[in-house]
Amino acid sequence: MAESHVQHKLLGMAKRRIPTLIAVITLLVVWEAWVRLGHVPSTMIAAPSEIAQATVETWPTLWPATQVTLLEGTVGFLLAVACGILIGILLYCSRVANAALFPLLSAAQTMPLISIAPLFLIWFGFEVSGKIVIVAVFGLFPIAVQTVRGLEAVPQFYSDVALTCGATRAWTLWHVKLRVAARQIYGGIRVSAAYIFATATTAEYLGARKGLGIWLQAAYNSFRTPLIFSATLVIIVITGILMCLVNLSERLLLGPADADADPDADQ
């Protein structure tokens, strides 16, 4: 019975992915045909087959650059998650902190990366640590905001029940409110994860010794368009892997999304 249920769910997931697969294949076929039949110069846009070939041929140098960006993005993302949740809790618990810090967080997010990257170059030089800090700073805002909103959206009766049973306010916050708000917090984590490696790559492009940003800069300077697409493809793939890991962690920690549904809602 359990095995048939698992097979049914896997079949359902596969069916939901079929339209995406068809769309991607169609896009690649049309793209390849347009470049080949239209005789589009490879310096302007590369065909998918050329991108795949360039990726394979340059992998011995592309992979070390990817490892650097992976390190910066992963460490920066973990810092953003930890700091974002803690800052969100602080903003929720303290009106003074909310009034003082939230405008600063909002202002930090409105600044383009290119405007503050020179400061980080002065402070950290071309080292990896500077890119990690940039990624963390730009990644924590959506997590902090969703943490505040999630905690504010928790119905009051959850706290009332816990406090009535003898729980302290601190215990109620960490064990009740955060658990109820966790789905919304994960929404902010997903938003952050979606652009974390792109942020790291852009920071490298503006000043670094190695990484995908330097790879892109070298490809651009030599007008090797297929290599630009190769680096872009790698960024998309590692971002997709990170998103899958975020979804997996949510499922392991919180269970399936439908597990939070009220069983009496339809009655």
Image (tube, helix red, strand yellow):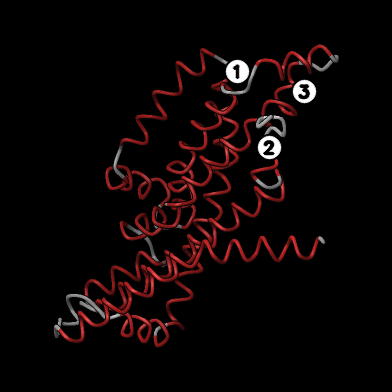
Mark 1–mark 2 Cα distance, whole angstroms, equals: 25 Å
Q: Secondary structure at mark 2?
A: helix
11 with respect to 159 (left or right):
left
* Quarter occupied by residue 29: bottom left
Q: Nearer the viewer, mark 2 or mark 3?
A: 2
Which residue is labeled 2 in the image? 260
**Rendered location of residue 253, percent (x, y):** 71, 46
What amino acid is labelled 2 in the image? Asp
What amino acid is labelled 1 in the image? Cys
Q: Residues within 10 Å of mark 2 (few under 14, many from 20)?
A: few
Instruction: Answer with mark 1 or mark 2, whichever residue precedes in sequence.
Output: 1
Instruction: Answer with mark 1 or mark 3, whichever residue precedes in sequence.
Output: 1
Q: Nearer the viewer, residue 193 or 260?
A: 260
Instruction: Answer with mark 2 or mark 3, whichever residue precedes in sequence.
Output: 3
Residue drawn at 45 percent across, 41 percent down: 137
* Quarter occupied by residue 103: top left
**Rendered location of residue 189, percent (x, y):** 53, 44
Mark 2–mark 3 Cα distance, whole angstroms, equals: 21 Å
Which residue is labeled 1 in the image? 93
Q: Residues within 10 Å of mark 3 (few under 14, many from 20)?
A: few
